[in-house]
Every structure is written in C-alpha cells, then in structure tokens.
Amino acid sequence: MISGGEKVELSKRQEQIIEIVKGNGPITGEHIADQLNLTRATLRPDLAILTMAGFLDARPRVGYFFTGKTGSELLTEKIRKYKVQEFQQIPIVVKESVSVYDAISTMFLEDVGTLFVVDDKSCLTGVLSRKDLLRASIGQQDLNTVPVHIIMTRMPNITVCRREDLLIDAAQKLITNQIDGLPVVKDTELGLEIVGRITKTTMTRVLVEITTDEQI
Ligand code: ADP
C-alpha cells in the first residue's frame, strides 16, 4: 500500500456530483443534495472523497468548485510528492577490506544487485555492482586475496540521495547516471552514513503499487 494513498474509484453518484459542480460551481453541499434529491448527510462521504482526491475543492461559505484537474494530472501530482523515505529498502553493506569472493557471496546470499562499501567508521566509501564483480572475476587475480576497495567505484564519484528527497528525483538520477541503485545517506560529522537504498526494483514496485492501489 502506498502510504498516504486512498483508493479512489468513482461511483456513479460521485460522477454525478462532479457534473453538477462543473456546471453550477461554486455550489453548496445543500444545493448539490437538492439536485440529487438526497440529504446533505448522505452526500457527506462522497464530497469528502472527491475533495480528498483533488477533483473538488471547498471554500467555507462559498461552496464546492471543480478543480479542473484530470485523473492523470492528479496522479502525476501525487507521484511528485512521494519521498525517498517512504519507499527506501534496507541497504546491504560490506567493509572495504572484504575480499571480492566474499562480496560475491554476500550478493547471492542477500539477493541484491548492488553492495555499498563502508570504512571502519561505517561511512560510505564505495559501490560494487554485479559487473564490477564480474570484471574482477575474469581477471587473473585470486578473488580471495583482492579486497573490494581495489575494484569498487569510490567516493567522491558516488551518486547518493537523502531520505527527504523526492522519489522522482532519485529515479532521474538512476536514469542519468545509468546505474541500478543509490545509497540513501545521512550526513554525519564523520562522513555519509548509509541508511537505505533505492533501486530500479523500488521503481518497478512503485509502478505496480500505483496501478493496483490507486485507481483515480
Ligand atoms: P551493473 O554494472 O551490474 O550493470 P550498475 O549499472 O549499477 O550495475 O553499475 C554500473 C557502474 O556504475 C559500476 O561500475 C558501479 O560501480 C557504478 N555505480 C553503481 N551505482 C553507483 C552509484 N550510486 N554512484 C556511482 N557509481 C555507481
């Protein structure tokens, strides 16, 4: 379930209300109810849903008016409000000194495609992708003796995001930098602490959740 999201599937009556408000707005709840031969109390839940979903707006002592926004505009607005922290997943982290062999094992065991590398103070120093590990594996080195800090992509060349960032901005970074994942970081005195991860899989999950939970 997408947090903050309400399932919005308009009923016939709600469609009628929208039409009335479109044609007569601003219009009070009483007058809408009159036109439908219903009581104001009966309409209250419908008006609440339509207002919450953004189809209608209400001003005290003026009444309801149509916002003029289509379903897809409202959906776009909603997606643009998603924050990284609502969707971030747990980061999988290894130390700089672990061997390439152990990093490969971790990737399999944890079932992730990107590992983040940290120093002794648990601050972000690098990223390991599947291809980084594959590249190291087809060399002549002994994978048990090569530490990951030799082959990782390192700071300051790591693209990061923060919890309060917009999810859509994180998605843009994945596309622009042609990478599979971003560490979600927190600034500390010692460096960047890794608090989460955002990946292409996160974005796929969001897409599926939007279509199953949100029907605007
Ligand atoms: P793969 O290499 O498996 O296709 P990516 O596309 O994520 O996976 O990685 C491509 C390259 O970019 C790798 O060398 C990797 O170390 C690097 N990389 C991955 N994520 C980041 C990131 N967040 N910031 C900077 N470089 C990254």
Image (spheres, rainbow, N blue to C red):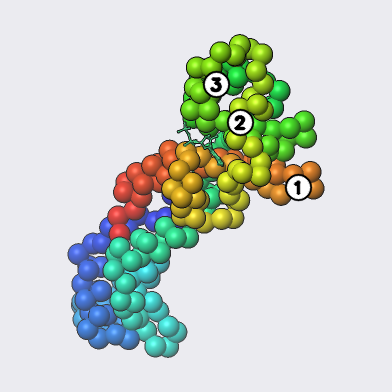
Indicate the secondary structure of the residue bearing disc 3: helix
- Residue count near mark 3 (Cα–Cα under 10 Å), binned few <14, some 14–19, many ≥20: some
Residue holding disc 1 = 188
* First of labels 2, 3 by sequence position: 3
Q: Is residue 18 above or below residue 80?
A: below
* Number of callouts: 3
Q: Is residue 44 above or below residue 31?
A: above
Instruction: Report if the beta carbon of the residue with label 2 is closer than 8 angstroms to ligand 1.
Output: yes
The location of residue 165, given as percent across then percent down, is 56, 55
Indicate the secondary structure of the residue bearing disc 1: loop
Task: State the residue in front, 209 or 142.
Answer: 142
- Residue count near mark 2 (Cα–Cα under 10 Å), binned few <14, some 14–19, many ≥20: many
| Position of residue 151 in the picture relative to residue 43 (left or right) | right
The location of residue 108, given as percent across then percent down, is 50, 20
Q: Using the numbered discs, state the Cα–Cα distance from disc 2 to disc 3 in whole angstroms.
A: 10 Å
Residue 162 visible in the shown view: yes
Foreground: disc 1 or disc 2: 2
> Mark 3 belongs to which amino acid?
Ala
Residue, x 37% and y 61% (percent of image)?
76
Residue 44 visible in the shown view: no
Foreground: disc 1 or disc 3: 3
| Position of residue 183 in the picture relative to residue 25 (left or right) | right
Residue, x 44% and y 40% (percent of image)?
200
Residue, x 60% and y 19% (percent of image)?
100
* First of labels 1, 2 by sequence position: 2
Residue, x 39% and y 56% (percent of image)?
6
> Mark 1 belongs to which amino acid?
Thr
Instruction: Report if the beta carbon of the residue with label 1 is closer than 8 angstroms to ligand 1.
Output: no
Residue holding disc 3 = 136
